Image: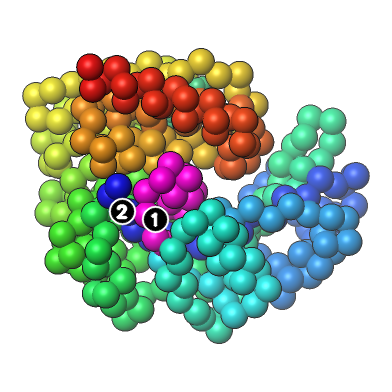
Amino acid sequence: MKSILGIGNALTDILAILPDDTLLGKFHLPLGSMQHVDLETGDQIWQALKEIGVKYVPGGSAANTITCTSILGMKSGYIGKIGDDELGNLFKSTMEQFGVQTTMLYDKKGSGRCMVFITGANAERTFASYMGAALEMGPEDLKQEYFEGYDYFHIEGYLVQNQELIARAVQMAKAAGCIISIDMASYNVVESNAAFLNNLIEKYVDIVFANESESRAFTKLDNPREALAEIAKMCEIAVVKVGKNGSWARKGDEEVFIPSWPATPVDGTGAGDTYAAGFLYAHSLGLGLKECGDVGSIIAAKVVEVVGTKIDIPRWRSAKTQIRKVIRKASK
Ligand SMILES: Nc1ncnc2c1ncn2[C@@H]1O[C@H](COP(=O)(O)OP(=O)(O)OP(=O)(O)O)[C@@H](O)[C@H]1O
Ligand SMILES: [Mg+2]
C-alpha cells in the first residue's frame, strides 16, 4: 500500500448546541455570522461553551482528507502547527487515534479553533474562529526528512496564503519523489493567489482538485468542462467537482464524467475533502480515472449524510463494500 503526507491548517472544530442566543449576545456574535476572534475572546468563549457541553472534531481540509486515507488503509502522515495546550494535544491525539502519523510543530500562540454555535429550531450556525498557531507555520519549520518515504503529498489550498511555505514544501516533496496534489479550497483563495497558483501547478502539481467556483476563478471560464480542459493542460490530472451533479476528471485527452452516488444529504461539509481522499487512494492502487472518481464520490456521498466531517462506522462499512465492488469490476 502506498503512503500519503498532508499539510494544512491544524484547526479543531468545537461544536456547541445552544439553548438560546444569550451567549452569542454576550460575545457580540451576530446570529449566522462568521467572525475572527483573538485568543483571549476565543478562550473565554470556549470556557463558556465547556459548561454547556461541546463536541471536538479535529478539522481543516487536509486533516480531513488524511484521516480518510488512513481509514482506507494508506500509511498517512500530517504536518500542521498547534500551540502547546489542551486543544493542541487533543488535535494530535485524535489524529493519531485514526492512525495518522503526525508531525506537529509548536508555536507560542494558542491552537487554532473554529467554534460553531448551533441555535434555534432551524439549527442556524454562527462561527467564531481563532487561527492562532496554525497561521504561524513557515518554511523554516519544514525538514526534508518529514517528506522522505511518502508516495503522495497533499496540500490544502488555504495554505497558499503562505506562499513561501508552500514553495518550500513542494520542493521537498518533489525531492522525496512524491506525487503532489492540491485542493483549491475556496474561490477567494484562488482569486487572491492566481499567479502563484498558476506557477505552482505548472511546475510542481500532478493532481488538481477544484469545485465549480474555484475552477471558474482559476480559469475565468464559466463552463466546468472548459475549465477542466484548461487546468488539465497544466498538470497530469485535473478534477472539477460539481456537487450533487457529480464531477469531471481529465488526464491528457482522456476525459470522464463521474455521477455522484445516491445520498440523503443533511450537511455538505467535508464532501470535497473526502472526495480527494477516495480519489487519491484509488489512484495509489493504480486504478483508472473513472474508478478514482467513483471511489471519491462513494465516500463523499457518505459524508454528506452526516453532520460534520466524520463518517460513522456503518457508513464506512457500506462505503468499503461499494469501493471493493468498483475495484473488483475494474480488475476484470
Ligand atoms: N448532495 C450530494 N449527494 C451525493 N454526493 C454529493 C452531494 N454533494 C456532493 N457530493 C459529492 O461530493 C463531491 C464533491 O462535492 P463538491 O462539488 O461540493 O466539492 P467541494 O465544493 O470541494 O466540497 P466542500 O464544500 O466540502 O469543499 C461531488 O463531486 C459529489 O461526488
Ligand atoms: Mg472543497
| Residue at x 72%, y 75% (from the top left corner) | 40
Q: Position of residue 106 (x, y in %)?
A: 50, 79
Marks 2 & 1, CB-CB < 8 Å contact: yes
Q: Which label number is shown at residue 311?
A: none
The foreground one among 273 and 100 is: 100
The Cα atoms of the two marked residues, 2 and 1, are separated by 6 Å
* Mark earlier in primary sequence (2, 1): 2
Q: Which residue is mark 2?
A: 3
Which residue appears farthest toward the bottom when viewing the image? 108
Amino acid type assigned to the residue bearing label 2 in the image: Ser
The foreground one among 320 and 18 is: 320
Amino acid type assigned to the residue bearing label 1 in the image: Ser
125 w.r.t. 47: above or below: above
The answer to whether any part of residue 204 appears in the image is yes
Q: Position of residue 129 (x, y in %)?
A: 63, 59
| Residue at x 45%, y 76% (from the top left corner) | 105
Q: Is residue 23 left or right of residue 125?
A: right
Q: Position of residue 25 (x, y in %)?
A: 85, 54
User: Does ligand 1 reach within 8 Å of label 1's beta carbon?
Assistant: no
Instruction: Characterize the local packing of mark 1: few (<14), some (14-19) or many (20 or more) Cα atoms within 10 angstroms.
Output: many
Q: Is residue 255 left or right of residue 146?
A: left
| Residue at x 45%, y 38% (from the top left corner) | 274
Q: Which residue is mark 1?
A: 76
| Residue at x 69%, y 55% (from the top left corner) | 56
The foreground one among 96 and 21 is: 96
Q: Position of residue 196 (x, y in %)?
A: 23, 56
Q: Quadrant of residue 312?
A: top right
Span highlighted in magenta in the image? 61-78
Q: Is residue 265 left or right of residue 101?
A: right
Q: Secondary structure at mark 1?
A: strand
